[in-house]
Image (cartoon, rainbow, N blue to C red):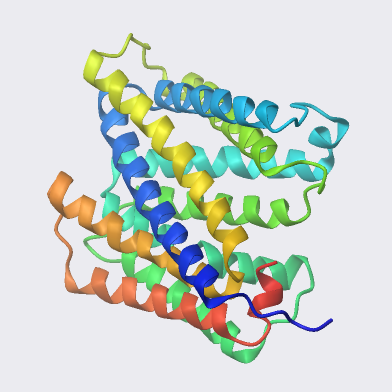
Amino acid sequence: MPTVDTDPRLNRLGTLWMVAAMALFAVEDALIKQVSVRLPVSETLVGFGLGGALVFAWVARSQGHALYSPAALSSVMQLRMGFEISGRLFYVLALALTPLSSATAILQATPLVVVLGAAVFLGERVGIARWLAIGVGLLGVVCVVRPGTDSFSALSLLAVAGMVGFAGRDLASRAAPVSLGTAVLGLYGFIAVAIAGAFYAGVEQRAWRWPATDTAIWLLAAISVGAGAYASLMKAMRTGDVSAVTPFRYTRLVFGIALGVTVFGEQIDGLTWLACALIVVAGLVALTSPGARNAGR
């Protein structure tokens, strides 16, 4: 089937939507980090999940979509839900307990793990350039985690676990029933966040409390920003060519590091900068190598 080139103006507009989405996701991370310092992580997850679920339930109903169908309980959706729960739980724990900049850097390896999973589990063809890119990108993650060194912290593995969960969710999303619209998938994704919080409540064993006014405002802001980020991402993917807009996902790293340094006073050393460069370059190679367009469908 011949490829139809998208109007360059649409690609530019799609790129702007993607950059906006990544900036909003970074702000969402910073807000969640602020809230999780003041409230139990489980309470933060439940509040964020229920709030986001209400937003997407309203969007789905306004678009005429049913909130429930038998397809929502398919085995693929159950698998997606499981990965969403683990990804959200571990990544929010990483935001709460580790620097925002390092958690963001590790998260940028998600597309590489998706490519790896597509090759291993979905039988997609991956050329030598993309295999090398996967290896380089994972080396970048190792440089952030730094196992076996004095600066190693086991807490950094939380971001790795969250990244793997998100990669599994993205792979499962590709096989999700097409009858489920984007807003419905968003609804179930946020329900999974609330479930993750409810599950972790038994592990955390911290008493929930009514949030202070400023904390409640930050949580509401996180819900609003998160919904806006998700909507911007969907707009980006539907406006320009996937191959044109997807590389700009890595701008999230810039925004995340900037917020980590300016808001939380984090220090970025040379090895972390090198790790970021390895992950971004590897991701761009994987996304622009032959076959990348099919891998991103």
Image quadrant where one finds the C terminus: bottom right
234, above or below 32, in the image: below
Measured as percent of width and height from the top left, residue 141 is found at: 40, 67
| Residue at the image point whose x is 28% and y is 77% from the top | 274
Q: Is residue 237 left or right of residue 150?
A: right
Image quadrant where one finds the N terminus: bottom right
Q: Is residue 94 left or right of residue 198?
A: left
Measured as percent of width and height from the top left, residue 50 is found at: 53, 22
Residue farthest top in this picture: 210
Count of numbered circles in the view: 0
Q: Nearer the viewer, residue 154 or 283?
A: 283
| Residue at the image point whose x is 50% and y is 40% from the top | 88
Q: Is residue 4 left or right of residue 28?
A: right
Measured as percent of width and height from the top left, residue 198 is found at: 53, 21
Quarter occupied by residue 186: top right
Quarter occupied by residue 136: bottom left
| Residue at the image point whose x is 56% and y is 23% from the top | 54
9, above or below 162, in the image: below
163, above or below 268, in the image: above
